[in-house]
Image: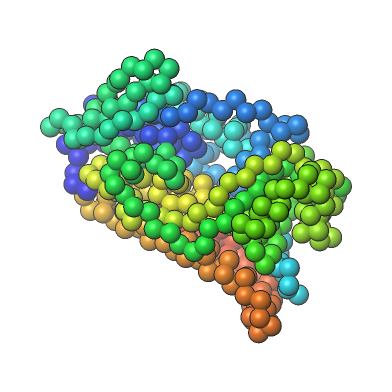
Amino acid sequence: MTDPGRHAGDSSFVSVVVGAGAVGLSAAVVLADFGDVVVIEATTPSDEPPTRWGFSARTVALHGASRALLDSFGRWAALDAHPIRGMHVWEVDGTAAIRFSDPGGLAWVVDNAVLEGELHAQAIACGVRVVRPATVQSIESGDSKAGWTVSYTARDTGAAEKVEADLVVGADGAASTVATLFDVKRERVGRAQWAIATIAKSAERHGDVAHQRFNRDGPVATLPLGDPHLSSVIWSADRERHLALRSLDAAAFSSALSDAMESLMTVADVDRRFAFPLIPAYVRTTTPANRVVLVGDAARTLHPLAGQGLNLGLEDVLGLREVLVKGAPSSAWGRYADDRRARSRFMLTFLSGLLETYRGQGPFTRLLRNIGVRAIDSSPRVKAQLVREAMGLGPLGQVGLS
């Protein structure tokens, strides 16, 4: 990227963010410190009712760096985040497990609908203009001062509109319109799976503990919610097992989930279930053109087994802010692009390798896994560093923020 004609912080600097999910709205709040911001979103706000227990089926686990960013917006207290104070990780064929604990919280579980609602309110409070539903039609070179002309159509009225922008941020998901318009290719890493998300009610209190069991065909994980008997569930599997799980009624699915959690959770009931594909991939460049940036799922899609998808998207936002604070020189953009791509590749390769490691069923492979798990679980120093990395506070979490 070369230096923009108008610099961040100039009164006339304009940013366009395409996408009004949590990452796009966070980017809009950050960019509002540097000039005017317009958010263009293709969908209307979701009117899907919460589950009968008051939570949406989609929850997110936010690590420490993400919490710090949201706290800087002044919205953390309103999120009603629930702490994960412990984590238990094991495998179906294993004899060892890893247990993590932190009374202050390893991570915090937030209802995604609440998160997006609070971020939208903060964006409006910062003077951001949100246009929805609207479809971006083109992004073309602008005049000598503004780098880009973003053309969009308001879907309610059919009116064609344009906005001149110095910076365009694509935060519009894996099927990103911005990425498509700039012919950005995605590179697959590892195998695709399918997931089922729901809310489960257990007979036991969850004790603020998250669980993750690696099955032969994918992991099943639970996250504790504010109600001591409710947990968010995401069950990932290969296609054949996924279809079998989807065919079960609520009682049979509850029984299968209880079996998967072994003696740790007796599932009394589950709410509506939602299925979606998991296709790990990343873009070959997060900066496909001068002053065009891809963030969040537009930049990469991760398997949810480590709960890092949204956290990496918020890392993108932090990195974007650092570039603009430095005045957005070309060297900073280049370093940002290289670092975010490296971070994406590392996380995708690591998660893919972890899944494949747990797929190995030979006796020698299982023995090595159990030896490794016991070694990690017996080392407080190693576990502490793993926790720091998971919270985005270790060296790997700082990639792209230099």
Q: Position of residue 333 (x, y in %)?
A: 27, 50
Indicate whether 111 appears above or below 368: above
When asked about the image quadrant of residue 244, the answer is bottom right
Task: Judge left or right: residue 337 versus residue 128.
Answer: left
Q: Position of residue 298 (x, y in %)?
A: 41, 45
Residue 105 in sight: no
Say how the picture is coloured: rainbow
Task: Judge left or right: residue 95 versus residue 332.
Answer: right
**How many numbered marks are there?**
0
Q: Residue furthest bottom?
A: 364
Q: Residue furthest right?
A: 203
Relative to the observer, which residue lies in front, 218 or 264?
218
Indicate whether 237 appears above or below 371: above
Q: Residue at x 38, y 54 (%)?
A: 186
Task: Look at the image and tell me in which quarter the C terminus lies.
Answer: bottom left
Q: Residue at x 60, y 32 (%)?
A: 114
Relative to the observer, which residue lies in front, 380 or 319?
319
Q: Residue at x 79, y 54 (%)?
A: 256
Q: Residue furthest top?
A: 157
Q: Residue at x 30, y 37 (%)?
A: 168
When asked about the image quadrant of residue 32, the answer is top left
Q: Position of residue 8 (x, y in %)?
A: 26, 36
Task: Judge left or right: residue 272 versus residue 228.
Answer: left
Indicate whether 37 appears above or below 103: above
Task: Judge left or right: residue 388 versus residue 287.
Answer: right
Q: Position of residue 6 (x, y in %)?
A: 19, 34
Residue 195 in sight: yes
